[in-house]
Every structure is written in C-alpha cells, then in structure tokens.
Image: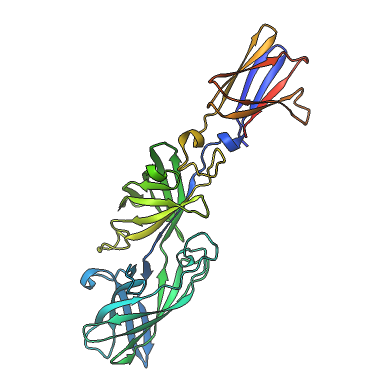
Amino acid sequence: MKSRVVRNYCPWFLVLVWLTPSVFAANQPAQVRLYCQSLQFQPATTRVAGQTYTLEITTADSFSEINGELAPLYSPNLPTHGALFRLQSPVALEPILGNIAFDQPEPVDLNENGFDDFFEVRQEGDGTAQGLFETPIDSGSVSVTWRRGAGSVTGTCQVRLTSSTFGQYPTFTHTFQLLEFKGTLSYVPSTNLITGTLKVARTGQEANLLSGATAMTRVATNRFNQVLLLPGSLVGAEGQVLLYAGTGLERDELTKTNYFGYFAMADGDLKTAATDYLDWVLSIDDPNDANGNGIPDLTDDLAAAGARRPVLRLARSANQLLLNISGDIGSRLDLETLGSLSAANWSRSLSVTLTNDPHVVVLPLPESAAQFWRGRGP
C-alpha cells in the first residue's frame, strides 16, 4: 500500500502522518464495455442431394457487398433483427434476393447486471425464435435456433425458411460473432466538463484496440444520475478513425455504480464500403467513491469526489506544539499517537473536523524523548 508520509524533526520527537487510501487515493479507471447490437454473420452453405445451396445476408444497398450484418430493426411490428438476403440455389436460374427478419433469443439476465446475456460474451446465449422473409415473388416464415457458449464470441444460428409457394428450403447453419470491446475510462472529476481517455480492446481479438479522448457533462436537473457524452472519435490500432455521436448515459438505479446508454457510430466497420454496424451500447462501471456517499465520483459533486489531501505542519510555540492542518473545510481526521514505532497499538488522541484552512490543533509537549502521531481519514 502506497501512503503519503510527512516527517517533521525536532530534537526530541518525530511526527509521522498516514492518510488512509479510502479517502485520498487517486481514482481507479472506470470499467467499460462497448457492444454492437448488430450481429456479424458468415455465409452458410449446405448440400442437398449433391446440390450446393448458399445463404448470405447483408445491409449494403442493392447487394453491393456482403457485409454479414444482421441489424436491429427497432419496430414493434417486426422481429428484432433483419437484413437483405441472397439465396443461391442450383434449381434457380438467378440468385433469390429478398428481405429477412427474425428475433434474437428471449432476453435473459442471469447475472443481474442489467444487460441481456445474449450480447455479453461471458454469458451463454441460446434460444429459438421466429421470423419472416419476403422476395419479389414469394414470402414465408423463418425459424431459427441460436447457440453460443459462455465465454465465446462466436456461435451458430440455424436458419430454416419455409416458402408459402415452394415449401421448405434447405436448413442453413451460420456462424455469427458478437462485437464486444472491453477496457477502461480514466477521467478527471469536474463540476462541469468531465474529461477522460477511453481505451478498449475487442474481446477475442485483443490486438484490435480503440482509444480516444472523451468529454462529458452532468445534466444539471439530475446531476448525480445523468451525463451527456459529447460527440467524439475513437482511433483504431491501424489509425482508422471511428466517429460517434453525442448521447445520454443513465445511472443504473439498482447497481448504483453503472452508467449506460446507446452509442451511435457514424460507421462501425471501416473495412467495408457500406455504412454499417452503427448501433452500440456503452456501459461504464465506476468503482470510485472517495467520500463513501454511494455516488460514484464520475457524477458526484467535485468537493466530495475530489477531496484535497491534507497537509500537516508542526511548529513549537513556548511550551506547546501547534499542528497546522491544511485541507478541505468540513473534512474529519482522527489523530492517533504512539510512544514507539515498535509498539503495536496506536491510541486515538482526538478527532478533528476542519473549520479553517489551515486548522490549528494545540498539542502538549511530549513527555518522552519521542512521540509519534498519525492522522486517519474516515
């Protein structure tokens, strides 16, 4: 444990002051998780009676490229996710093109952190769901089976299309990936503009890094529970720049330490020509609470979150000692004393609440050749 030690020497005594880390330690970085609400599908190929069928999905306009994105739809009348699809069949003269949509597994939160387990790599993501598809000449239903083990970024999605005209198509088993980044946010507490640095790495591909400066402001009408993340950018390991829009983050009412919100990128995958993988969720978990009031330092008032480290100075005046303590007015310190450092037990001398800066404490001259004092924060 690293502590600040202040020594003042006089011919007959020594003052030793320890400040407890619970109040005066520097901020730990907040923990960050950033995940995409789109899923990345690989093409699926299956063989029936010696014939090869291939199913591909994309969100690129007019099938200009196959980017594999299954994107959120945000419609109460449609399944949760959808895309364009291209089905290549040996019995069709041309590829079958259309729209496809189906649900993700029913939301589950077994670890009770407020986030759907399906989009959390460390959690399992299994389930069955339904959907629909449509082509210029046909339509039908979709049944899917999702499988992904806990700790794995990849899973499988078995897709079965049943045409209202032609009956059931072959079953396709796609491999899909979650896009999740984890890392830290180092920040400087402030009453107004909260500046920091975000550093995250992609889960399963830790060399894929994103980092950038961040800026946030507290919402004046609900300053402890809401912040606005200002527009900014993240830079990848290869120098690519990903722009993101400003967004609001809410403090979780149950965990009390988590802030979360939607995170919209201008283009989430610069390796594709299409503008894709736009919709993400940002989670910030802040363990810092310098004053122990239950409000993370990220949104706490500056005077509480950023308590000033006290400075102690000792002086002699006639037949007494004057201990000058410089620090935040209203903060409390327990003064403890010890006759020898080889002794085991410190005894509390008195408790001091700072009413001035500096605050002066009058101490008697020590009776022994040496006397030790230390200050402990609450």
Q: Quadrant of the C terminus?
A: top right
Instruction: Name the one closer to the observer, 123 or 285.
Output: 285
Which residue does the image show at 25% across and 86% down from the upper left? 138
Is residue 146 shown left or right of residue 142?
Answer: right
Residue 218 vertical placement versus 33 (above, below): above
Q: Quadrant of residue 45?
A: bottom left
Which residue does the image show at 30% across and 68% down from the upper left? 67
Is residue 33 shown left or right of residue 318?
Answer: left
Is residue 342 shown left or right of residue 178?
Answer: right
Instruction: Name the one closer to the observer, 222 or 248.
Output: 222
Residue 339 vertical placement versus 107 (above, below): above
- Is residue 152 in view? yes
Q: Quadrant of the N terminus?
A: top right
Instruction: Name the one closer to the observer, 273 or 306.
Output: 306
Q: Position of residue 56 (x, y in %)?
A: 31, 76
Which residue does the image show at 42% across and 43% down from the upper left? 223
Which residue does the image show at 38% across and 64% down from the upper left? 37
Q: Position of residue 299 (x, y in %)?
A: 45, 43
Q: Position of residue 175 (x, y in %)?
A: 41, 74
